[in-house]
Image (cartoon, rainbow, N blue to C red):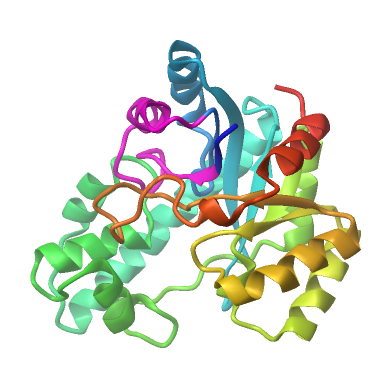
Amino acid sequence: MKADLHLHSTASDGTLEPDELVALAAEMGFTHLALTDHDSVEGISRAQDAARDCGVTLIPGVELSCGAQKEIHILGYGFDPYDERMLEFCRMRTMERQTRAEKMVRQLRENGAKISLDRVMELARGVVARPHVARALVEAGYANSVSNAFDKYLLPGKCGYVPKTEVKVEEAAKLIAGAGGVAVLAHPMELKMGEMALESLVHEWHGQGLAGIEVYHPSAANNSLPFLEHLAEREGMLTTGGSDFHGPQVRQSRIGEGLERWATMEADMRRLMNRIVL
């Protein structure tokens, strides 16, 4: 078994089409994948078709954006991608993203970064997000990389930052569970908080429906893995892993990045598969 449960396509801010992404992963020997686009389930049908052709198990997934000033991402696995409440949530978030992108571009232009909203939307090809604004900034010469564009313009406190409408973790977990899936905290180390604070939050969210922790992710340093592993075990939660792959041109990442450390992959995947219906 070879799994990657955190992948993005052009249905959000990835650079590969859903079918291209699945085909690439299959060529690399992956047997189990989850497409987890940001606030979007638009790519799942195409990914499922490609997975059938490639002999790969495709788990329907999504990455829901929660929080306001501090972004918290909740992964959903194994839900019904045609659930009307999930579809409506994603439609509303897509509309909010459009409005947010318009505000970002307006603020950037007011501060001297004369990028075009039309170009941002061309880059997005659907669900617009900050990385598309960042790419437009790079193209226009205002930054030398996507990460540099974030640092200069798009992080909280910078001239192009626009906060999202807050969605609580409990709301996201209930939405996913209501559609038949399980909710997992994405890349917890990106929250950049102390162990005691993270333990407290995870315990609280577990009581609100959070079912697992994405322990294995490129942002988790080797010395943080024992803490995350023990936290998931102590709470009786699922353990998952994913590369957060957005495409070969983004952050020089690759499918499966950081997952060679996932020694308990088969056992953890069995636990997950027993909790969902494909």
Location of residue 150 with respect to 37 vertically, above or below? below
Q: Residue at x 50, y 15 (%)?
A: 55
Span shown in magenta: 5-30
Is residue 270 in sight in this rendering?
yes
In the image, is residue 79 part of the stretch drawn in magenta? no
Q: Residue at x 71, y 52 (%)?
A: 184
Location of residue 23 with respect to 253 vertically, above or below? above
Tell me residue 128's x, y (percent): 36, 51
**The one of 149 and 202 positioned closer to us in this rendering:** 202
Q: Residue at x 32, y 47 (%)?
A: 247
In the image, is residue 19 part of the stretch drawn in magenta? yes
Is residue 181 in sight in this rendering?
no
Using the rendered view, name the quadrant where residue 69 is placed. bottom right
**The one of 276 and 180 positioned closer to us in this rendering:** 276
Tell me residue 19's x, y (percent): 37, 25
Using the rendered view, name the quadrant where residue 46 is placed. top left
Q: Residue at x 35, y 75 (%)?
A: 154
Quadrant housing the C terminus: top right
Tell me residue 158's x, y (percent): 35, 85
Q: In the visual, does 103 lie left or right of 111? A: right
Location of residue 163 with respect to 172 vertically, above or below? below
**The one of 224 and 106 positioned closer to us in this rendering:** 224
Tell me residue 9's x, y (percent): 39, 40
Using the rendered view, name the quadrant where residue 112 is placed. bottom left
| Outermost top residue | 53
Q: In the visual, does 275 lie left or right of 120? A: right
Location of residue 39 with respect to 54 vertically, above or below? below
| Outermost left residue | 141
